[in-house]
Image (cartoon, rainbow, N blue to C red):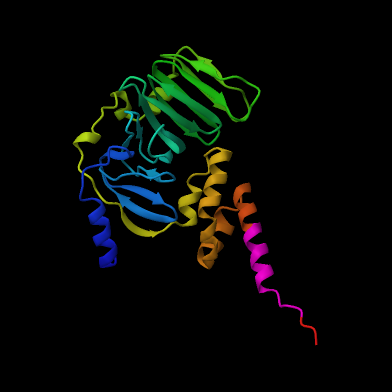
Amino acid sequence: MPAALLAAALLLASGPVAAQQAVISHAEQPSRLIRKTTVHQAFAGVRLQAGDIVESGTHTVQIEWPNGARVALGPASSILVHNAAGLPSATVLRGWSKFAATAPAGGRLALEAGVLALQATAASGIVYLAPDSTELFVESGTVPATDMARAAVPAVPVGSGQYAVRHASRPLDVAPRAPRLFIGRMPRAFLDPLVAVAALVPAAAALPQRDVDAADIAAWRDAGATARRRLASQFAPRLADPAFRRDAESVLAGQPEWRDALRRHNAVKNRTSAPLNQLF
């Protein structure tokens, strides 16, 4: 890393964790942070910005917001942070996540996973985003679940102890308890409540490593259509890199959002490379 860039990163990390920003409050191992189009190594204490993507790797990671809302990621899981200050909001991009919006009083969290939009107020639960379904187990409180693909259907309240699943081809189904398969696959760390620890963590810097590549983006293919459109818009500038463009044509073209991005990029490229008509 250039010395000037490292010095700037360390300077930003020298103070206490900002009280008005979301922060990675716990990480068993350094996690990955994708900011704009750059992949960083991120430690506990790294402040987050709107648009950041946090990936857990092989261990768990916890994020906390100023209002007390918390989200933990299980192994091989990713989340997109929409709002790093104010009302917390995020989108699960893959894998397992556990959320808690229970303290202080009035703590809230807006969370999207697949086609479901969840509003947690004084509630906690566990979400699993699979290739063909989104699963929700509510530990405490009540979580209204809105099906974003069915605009005319009102939010369904999922109460404490209940389990809900939205399969790709079926409407949301709520059951009185979680099935054994869900409990058996759940990360063991999720059996414990999420404890607020951000106030104890010194500030840290995110260390830039490389540009995001097509394989990174392909790992988020299970995200909902709204999230995929946002991701395609965020990373479309990388199509200017010929190597990224070749990889995108190979591993991302199966997603309609990236087919559109590639089509637009190629149209602009063809216009700019076409010879101008000359009149003599």
- Specify the quadrant of the image occupied by residue 11: bottom left
Say whether residue 128 is magenta.
Answer: no
Left or right, residue 278 beside residue 135:
right
* Relative image position of residue 199 (x, y in whole percent): 22, 34
Q: Residue at x 34, y 53 (%)?
A: 40
Relative to 180, does residue 228 appear above or below in the rendering?
below
Q: Nearer the viewer, residue 207 or 76?
A: 207
- What is the x, y in percent for residue 247? 53, 60
Q: Nearer the viewer, residue 192 or 47?
A: 47
State yes or no: residue 268 in magenta. Answer: yes
Would you say the magenta stretch is mainly helix, strand or loop? helix
- Quadrant where the C terminus lies? bottom right
- Residue range of the region highlighted in magenta in the rendering: 263-277
Q: Is residue 59 left or right of residue 158?
A: left
Camera-side residue: 127 or 37? 37
Would residue 86 appear left or right of 157 to someone viewing this image? left
> Is residue 12 visible in this depiction of the protein?
yes
Check the image and name the residue furthest to the right: 280
